[in-house]
Image: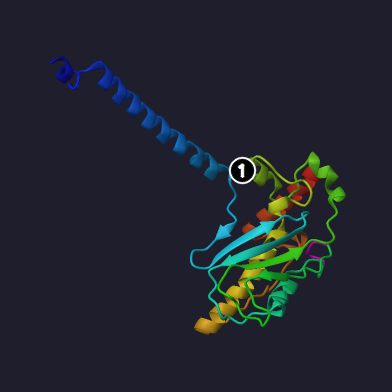
Amino acid sequence: MQASHCLLPSCPHIISSRVLRRASSQQQHRETRRPVVTQQAASQGSTFGQLFRVTTYGTSHGLGVGCIVDGCPPRLPITVEEIQGDLDRRRPGQSRITTPRKESDTCQIVSGVSESGWTEGDPIHITVPNATQRSQDYAEMEVAYRPSHADATYDMKYGTRAVAGGGRASARETIGRVAAGAIAKKLLKQVCGTEVATGASACQACSRMHNHSPILTSVGMLCRFSAMLVE
């Protein structure tokens, strides 16, 4: 009877083991959930797409920038010259309304494309080295955010920022997007016959904006306010 009595639910050591197992399971559940929420809140997404996935990498004053394209089918003809053509269109230093930084932005296909110019079905890695970064020019940004730049919002969102060049918030991050876009554009033309064309119809300085436009007036006031902060 004593042995069978120990099998009853009211037995102290059985109840305690169940409580311990339940408490341990709840604790493990909380521990597995907590880091995920923290990671999502503190991470910057750099991968886009589902079937055609693009991951950009690199910073403005690092060794280089680029992208990895995953999901591109094999046997797509693509050359480094086609990708370079689109990169040349976004290259800085070509007009007075862009950054004066001079970069050749010469791309290299590291993997994913055969020597004969055909995609191989595996991830395509394209890299562009940085050549003329001047980190010493950004010393004053240690104590002040740059107007009209993402320095402030990046710092507030992620708790860190790259003073020299803006890091991932720099426009040089778009090099990876342009390179991946050149491949996507070729794929759309090859498979669907789709042509992609872009262009800018006009670009004017804030001082030349018409004051009677509420949108342009707001932009002009923002630019003047940013200039006052710098002074």
- Examine the structure image and report whether residue 43 is included in the region drawn in magenta: no
Quadrant holding the N terminus: top left
Question: In the visual, does 93 lie left or right of 89?
Answer: right
From which residue to which does the magenta span run?
96-100
Residue at 59 percent of width and 79 percent of height: 186
x then y, percent, for residue 15: 26, 21
- Compared with residue 61, is residue 105 higher up or lower down, i.e. above or below? below
In which quadrant of the rendered view does residue 214 lie? Answer: bottom right
- Compared with residue 180, is residue 223 higher up or lower down, i.e. above or below? above
Question: In the visual, does 17 lie left or right of 125?
Answer: left
Residue at 78 percent of width and 64 percent of height: 98
x then y, percent, for residue 215: 63, 58
The residue labelled by disc 1 is 157
Question: In the visual, does 75 lie left or right of 81?
Answer: left
In which quadrant of the rendered view does residue 115 lie? Answer: bottom right
Nearer to us in this view, 118 or 191: 118
x then y, percent, for residue 119: 60, 77
Secondary structure at numbered mark 1: helix
